Amino acid sequence: MDPSEIGRAMNALRKHHGGGGSKRRVPHDPEARYCLCVDCRKARGHYPAHLIEKPARKRKKKAKSA
């Protein structure tokens, strides 16, 4: 195995890819031409879909028959 194949194999085993970036909250800046607050990014469609609040999924418990 050459080193590039080893790297590909290790990446395939990782649970997620990427650094994730910073999770900082930027306040809204009305003076800025290109505001980076969460609400402005959502309005532009630049906010990642997996970070938008989703309703919690609840599973129903099944009754076990004895």
Image (cartoon, rainbow, N blue to C red):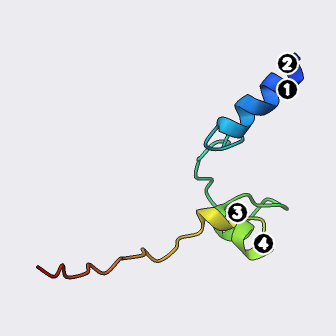
Q: What whole-number distance in Å separates the C-alpha atoms at marks 3 and 4? A: 8 Å
Residue 10, image x, y percentages: 71, 29
Q: Nearer the viewer, mark 2 or mark 3?
A: 2
Q: Earlier in the sequence, mark 2 or mark 4?
A: 2
Three-letter code for the amino acid on which mark 3 is drawn: Pro
Q: Earlier in the sequence, mark 2 or mark 3?
A: 2
Q: Earlier in the sequence, mark 3 or mark 1?
A: 1
- Residue at image position (65%, 70%) is 39
Three-letter code for the amino acid on which mark 1 is drawn: Glu
* Residue of label 2: 1
Q: What whole-number distance in Å separates the C-alpha atoms at marks 2 and 4? A: 43 Å
Q: Nearer the viewer, mark 2 or mark 1?
A: 2
How crowded pointer 1 is (Cα within 10 Å; few <14, some 14-19, many 20+) is rated as few
The N terminus - image quarter: top right
Q: Nearer the viewer, mark 2 or mark 4?
A: 2
Three-letter code for the amino acid on which mark 4 is drawn: Gly
How crowded pointer 4 is (Cα within 10 Å; few <14, some 14-19, many 20+) is rated as few
* Residue of label 3: 48
